[in-house]
Structures are given as C-alpha cells and as structure tokens.
Amino acid sequence: MSEQDATLKLERVPLPSGFRSNRESLPKNITETLQAMQVGESFLVPTRDREHSARKMAALRSRCVRFQKDNPGAFFAFAREEKDGKFGVRVYRVER
C-alpha cells in the first residue's frame, strides 16, 4: 500500500504527560518595533546557537507575515548572524 492509498483515521489519544509545545517566543515589543521601523533599519534578536536561530527565524517570518496583512506596505528581510561566538537573527525593513 502506498502512502497515497492510506486513509487517515481519527483517534482519541490523550496528550502525553509532560508534553510541552515547542512554540518559539518573541520579544514582547515586537509589534511596536515593527511599526516603528523605517526602510534601512534593522534589529537583532539574540539566539543560543544555529539551531535556535533557525527556529527563531521561522517565528519571526511568521510574525512579519501576519504584520504585513495589516500593514501592506511593510516588507522585511531576515538574516542569521554569528559573530564572536554569539548568534542571532537580524530583521531588516526593506523596500519592495
């Protein structure tokens, strides 16, 4: 049987005890910061390591997409940074 032939079946299985969502948190003032940004400005969100940078970048991209729905002229670019053993994700306000 191929994966395409498989039929999904709904089940009632309890969540494992101790389960914790891996939701990546963002700074509390992220919306205000995005609103205040002008083209050419950027900010850095510090991270622990490369893997954490990837998760943080995904969360930041998602947040910026939601922000753009209410602010259609706002465009952002993202870059991972590593300098002197410190990691982070930089968010840039850009022109489209």
Image (cartoon, helix red, strand yellow):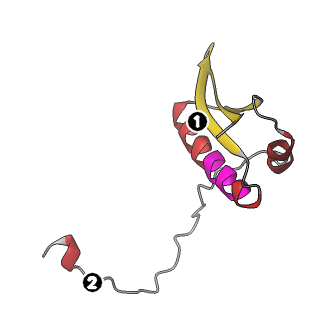
Amino acid beneath label 1? Ser
Q: Is residue 13 above or below residue 86?
A: below
Which mark identifies residue 89?
Answer: none
Taking the view exactly as shown, the residue that stands out farthest to the left is 1
Q: Are marks 2 and 1 in contact (CB under 8 Å)?
A: no
Residue 20: quadrant of the picture? bottom right
* Stretch of the chain drawn in magenta: 59-67
Q: Is residue 4 left or right of residue 22?
A: left
Q: Is residue 27 left or right of residue 5?
A: right
Amino acid beneath label 2? Thr
Residue 48: quadrant of the picture? top right
Q: Is residue 66 shown in magenta?
A: yes
Identify the residue at image location x=58%, y=36%.
53
Label 2 neighbour load within 10 Å: few <14, some 14-19, many 20+: few
Q: Is residue 71 above or below residue 74?
A: below
* Element carrying mark 2: loop
Q: Is residue 12 above or below residue 67?
A: below
- Where residue 41 sits in the image (x, y, percent)? 77, 29
Residue at the disc numbered 2: 7
- Where residue 89 sits in the image (x, y, percent)? 64, 33
- Where residue 62 sits in the image (x, y, percent)? 62, 53
Q: Is residue 39 shown in magenta?
A: no
Mark 2 or mark 1: name the one nearer the start of the chain.
2
Residue at the disc numbered 1: 53
Label 1 neighbour load within 10 Å: few <14, some 14-19, many 20+: many
Main secondary structure along the magenta-highlighted residues: helix
* Element carrying mark 1: helix
